[in-house]
Image (tube, rainbow, N blue to C red):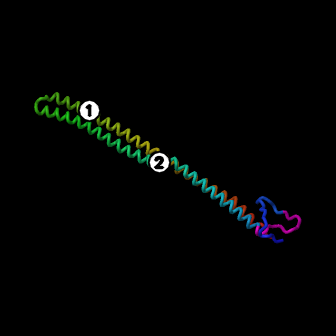
Amino acid sequence: MQADSTAECTVALPHAKINDANGKKCGIVPDCQTVAVTQQQTYWNDEVARAYKTKDSAKDYAKRSMMPEDEISRARTIRVKMSKENRMRARVQIAGIAQKYRAAKDAMLSGSLDKAAFEQAYKLVASEVSSIRFEFASRQKDIEEAWDLVKKRQENAEQYVAQDLMAIDEVYEQTLAQLTERYGKRIAYYQSLPLI
């Protein structure tokens, strides 16, 4: 019995069994087999497309946890600017003290200041220079620590994103394998049915 090519085909489920107890020839019409296989391939392609779209969305979402490039650039600019200001501040302070020291030295050389007073002035200047150097180093350390925090945050974000992307790829590959198994079995089943 030949089926009309325009007739609707009812596709048997993969777990359905063919009943040939009545002695009639059992099987599937070639057109229906083609429709069944095409239907399963369409479902398979749709599922793969959905999995790919989900993977892309997950990757985009994972990459959002990275620091924006302009924020890193801004932090770098602030670090350079603050370091420059810190150096200039220390240089201005040192220049002011150097003028006072030169005045004291000139006074000693001219004889208007005795050696003991000059030594006392020298110790005072050395103490102030040491204090300025300590303050400079302390401020510079704070600047570098702020920059290191930005770098650390970026490195951590890169590690998290790399782990997330790896997990996303693994899930995607597992999904593809499951789809291949599911739809591959169904298509193989329909293709294995006897034709009538």
What is the x, y in percent for residue 80? 35, 45
Query: Which amino acid lies under the numbered mark 1 shown in the image of this protein?
Result: Glu
Residue drawn at x 55%, y 49% is: 61
Please give left or right for residue 115 compared with residue 174 in the image: left
Residue designated by label 2: 68
Question: Which quadrant of the figure contains the N terminus?
Answer: bottom right
What is the x, y in percent for residue 69? 45, 49
Query: Which amino acid lies under the numbered mark 2 shown in the image of this protein?
Result: Pro
Q: Secondary structure at mark 2?
A: loop
User: Does residue 33 sit above or below 127 in this rendering?
Assistant: below
Residue 58 magenta-highlighted:
no
Question: Which quadrant of the figure contains the C terminus?
Answer: bottom right
Q: Which residues are magenta?
A: 19-31
Residue designated by label 1: 128
What is the x, y in percent for residue 102? 17, 35
Residue drawn at x 30%, y 41% is: 87
Judged from this view, the residue extending furthest toward the right is 22
How many residues crowd around disc 2 within 10 Å: few (fewer than 14), some, or many (20 or more)?
Answer: few
How many residues crowd around disc 1 within 10 Å: few (fewer than 14), some, or many (20 or more)?
Answer: some
Residue drawn at x 29%, y 37% is: 133
The answer to which quarter of the image holds residue 9 is bottom right
Alpha carbon of mark 2 to alpha carbon of mark 1: how far? 43 Å
The answer to which quarter of the image holds residue 46 is bottom right
Residue 25 magenta-highlighted:
yes
Judged from this view, the residue extending furthest toward the left is 111
